Image (cartoon, rainbow, N blue to C red):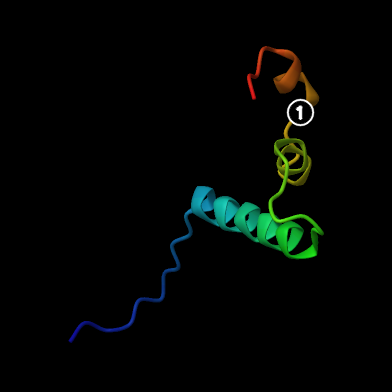
Amino acid sequence: MAPPSTTTVQDHVALAEIELCGELIIAASAADEDRLSPDRIDEVLKVAAERSESGRVD
């Protein structure tokens, strides 16, 4: 059996994705409607307004 590792490895991208998923879960649980609108999702994820102006198709 290998000894326990004292080094902690963190995947910062994975941690950021988990945090964003958590934010979406919180927003969805607080929403009155069945689904979050694309605009609300962008707001929760802090997507820049420029993205929607640069040709995003819904």
Query: Which residue appears at 45% of the width and 68% of the height?
Result: 8
Camera-side residue: 23 or 37?
Answer: 37
Camera-side residue: 2 or 13?
Answer: 13
Percent across and percent down for residue 35 are 69, 51
Percent across and percent down for residue 53 are 75, 15
Task: Please state, as top left, top right, bottom left or bottom right, where the N terminus lies in the image.
Answer: bottom left
Q: Is residue 42 above or below residue 4?
A: above
Q: Is 12 left or right of 28, judged from the image as shown?
A: left
Q: How many marks?
A: 1
Camera-side residue: 34 or 39?
Answer: 34
Camera-side residue: 15 or 5?
Answer: 15
Q: Secondary structure at mark 1?
A: loop
Query: Which residue appears at 71% of the width and 43% of the height?
Result: 41
Q: Is 3 left or right of 19, judged from the image as shown?
A: left
Q: Is residue 27 above or below residue 46?
A: below
- Residue under numbered circle 1: 48
Type of residue at label 1? Ala
